[in-house]
Amino acid sequence: DTRSHRRSGPDPSRRRTASRRFGARGGRRSYRRSGLAEPRLGLRPLGRPLGRSDLLDTPRERMSPAAGELSKLLDGDDAANGGGDASDAERFERAEMARAQAQSDAAEGKRRLEVARQQFAEYATSKADESKALRDVIRELAAGGAPEIQQALERLDRLAAQAETEARAVAATAEAERTAATRTTNGDAFGGNAAVHNAAGETNMEVDPLLPVKTKTGGDERDLDQLEIERKDALLGDAALNFGERAKYIPLRLDMEERKLLRLLEAALHVSEYTDHVDVVTFRGKTQRITKQLKEICAIMCGLVVATDYRAGQELIKDKDFETNALFFQRAFEIGRRHKVMNPEKMRAEYGKMIYLLQDSQSDEVQELLGFKLVKPMRTAYTLLSEKNGLAMLDDGLMHQATAEIDHVGKARFEVQRLIKAKEKARELLARKYATADLTKDEILAVLYSISDNNAYLRFNRDPVDRMLLYLTSNFDPKRPGDDRAFSLGINVGNNGSRLSHTHERQFAYVSQSLTLWREVSNDMFKLWTLAETDLLHESNRYQLTNTGQGLNRVQHAPRVGKAMHQLLHRCQQKLGSWVGSSVVHLGDHNVPNALMFIDKYTQVPRILGPVVLVVDSVESLCDDPNLRAYVESTFGSIERCRRCILADFFRHAFDGSGADNFFDAGSCIDGRLTSAWNWCSKIEKKPYYPVFKLAGFQGFDGGDFRS
C-alpha cells in the first residue's frame, strides 16, 4: 500500500537505490512522471527493488511453457544473442547492410522497369488518340476545299493513319510485355497485379490500372452501373441502400471506460521509442532482432498492466506470463486503432509505433513465445448489430434523419433547432423500435452516434474536395481560357517549376480527374483504412527494412489496398470518359513503402484543400473592412480577381508534376499529383497573394492552427 509505505518511511539506503534505479531525480514523483508509462522490466517500482536474482529464482513450474521460454529470453544478455567479437560483428553488420541494400535496389529496379513499361504504353495510346483526332480535323477540312487542298489533306490523312496504327501497335506490344513480365514473376512482390485472397478465402484478381475508359458490355457494365448508382445514392443520403455496407467499416464510438484505457495506451506509446530501437540495421542476426522486439513489446505491455493494476503488474513483471492478460492487451490496442480511424488528426506519432509493434507481434517467432495474438478485429457498428441480431435497423428509412450532419451555414437559428430536434426524435424512435433483450437502447444509440461521426468526418474531409471541384467548374471554362490570359490554366515545362506541358483544356481535365479521385478516396477512407490495417497486420505479409532514400522504411506490399485503389481509379475513368497522364499507383515501393504511408498521404488531402477553401470563401467578408478592401482592389483589381488569382495558381502549380527530379517520384502518376500539391504548399510564402492568406487567419497546412 503506497500510503502506509509513505507513513512508515522507507529505509534511507533503499530510497537511494530507488533514486539510482529511476533516474537522477529519483523518488516516487519521478516514477509517477515516467515509470508508469514505461516501466523497466525486472524492476519493482515501489517497496523492495526486484533484482535479477528474483527473476532467475522464479519457479518455472508455475509458468506456461511459452512464459518460461520468454522469461529465459528476456533475462538473457543482448551481447550473448549476437555472438562473436566486435570485429566479427562489425564485418557481419557491413555485409548484412550491403546485402539488404542490394536486394532492395534490385526490387526497386524491377518496379521502376514495370512502371516505365506501363507509362510507355499509356504514352503510346495517348499519341494514337491524338493522331485519330487529327484525322478527324483533316477530314472536316477536306470536305469543302479545292482539289489541290483535298489531295494534300488526303496525304496528311494517310500519314496520320499510319502514325495511329504504329502508336497502337507499340502500345499493344508494351502492354503485352508488361503483362508477361508480371505473370512470369507471379505478381509484383511490392504490390502489383497479383491475386489477392480476402478474409473469406476467395481469390480476387487486381483491377488492371490500364483498363480502357470505354464502357464495358454485359455483366461488367451492369456492375459498373450499380457502383455508380450506389455512389449517387451516397451523395443524396439515401441510407436505405447504403448504410448496410458503410457500417462494416465504421468503427464503434468509444465509451467512457474505453477512453480511460485509451489515455493509458497513448501515454505508454508516447514515451516508447520502439521504432528507434527496432528499426535499425545494427543487429547481428535474426535472433537478436526478435529478442529486442520482444523486450520492447513486453516493456509496453508491462507498463499498461502496472498502471492499471499494480499488484497484477508486479506478478506480470515477476512471472512474465503475458498470456493470462491476453484479452486486456488485445482490447487496449484495438481501442487505439479504432480511435485513430475515427480521428485521423489524433495519435500522429503514437499510431505509427503501435502499428509497427503489432506488425512485429504477428510474426510466428514472437507469437510462439508470447502464446497469443495482440491483434483482434476492429469493432464496428456492423459487428455490434450483427452480434445482437439488429441489422434490420440499417434498412430503416429513419436512419438518414437520425445520423445526418446538420449544416448551419445559410440557415436561421430556429431552422437549425428544428433539424436538431427532428434528429433526436428519430434516434429515440429507432432506439425504442429495435431495442430487444440482447440489443439495448444504449447500444443502438452508440451505433447511431458512430455513423453520425462518420458523416461528420465526411463533411470535414470530403466536402473541401467538392468545394474545389465547384470552384474549378464555376470559375474556369473547360475548353478555352477566355479573354484574360492571366487566368489560363495552361502550363509549360520549366515555367515556374512545372514539369508538365498542358494546354488549358488538358490541364482542366487533369485537375478535374485528380480532384475526383481524391474525392472518391476520401469518401471510402474508412474502408481503405480497414484494408490497410489488414495488409499491414497480415501474418503472412512480411516486410523488408530498406533505405528508400528517406531513411529506413518498412517496405511491404499491400494487395488489398492496391485492389481497392485500382477499383476507385477505374470508377473515375468510367465516369470521366478519358484520362490525362499516368495511371500508375505507387504502393509497396520506395515512394509509398507500405499501406500506413498510403493512409498518411491521403489523410493530408483535407489539410491541403481546407485552408485554401476557407481563404477563398473569406475574401469577400475580409473586404468588409474599408482598408482591406482598398488593399485587395489596388493589388488584384477586385475581389473576384483576387479569388480567381488564388484558384488559377493552385490549379496550375499544385498539379504541374513538380516535387521531384524524375517522373518516377513525381509527375502525372496517381501519387505524383499529391506530391505536386505538397510542393505547392511548401512555396505558399512566396506567392503574391500570401498576405491575403495571413489576413484570413492562415497559420499552416498542418491542421489545428487554422481559424475555422
Image (cartoon, rainbow, N blue to C red):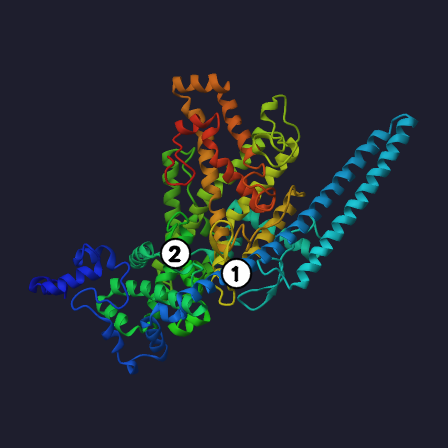
How far is disc 2 from disc 1 in space, using C-alphas? 19 Å
Compared to 43, does 208 lie above or below? Answer: above
Residue 569 placement, left or right of 217: left
Q: Are marks 2 and 1 in contact (CB under 8 Å)?
A: no
Residue reaching furthest to the right = 147
Q: Label 1 neighbourhood size at 10 Å, few (<14), some (14-19), many (20+)? A: some
| Residue 302 rendering spot, x and y as whole percentages | 29, 65
Within 10 Å of disc 2 (Cα), the crowding (few <14, some 14-19, many 20+) is few
Residue 322 falls in which quadrant of the image?
A: bottom left
Regarding residue 373, the answer to whether it shows in the image is no
Q: Amino acid at mark 2?
A: Asp
Residue 262 locus on image (x, y percent): 32, 57
Task: Please state which of the two labelled residues, at mark 2 or mark 1, is closer to the viewer.
Answer: 1
Relative to 13, is 701 above or below? above
* Residue in the picture at 83% in, 41% down: 161
Mark 1 belongs to which amino acid? Answer: Ala
Q: Decide if residue 570 is on the left or right side of residue 702.
A: right
Residue 533 spot, x, y in % from top left? 47, 59
User: Residue at image x 56%, y 60%?
Assistant: 103
Q: Where's the N terminus, which quadrant?
A: bottom left
SS for callout 1: helix
Q: Residue 276 shows which numbered tag?
A: 2
Find disc 1 in the rendering and name its residue: 100
Q: Position of residue 313 (x, y in %)?
A: 25, 68
Q: Is residue 339 visible?
A: yes
Mark closer to the chain start, 2 or 1: 1
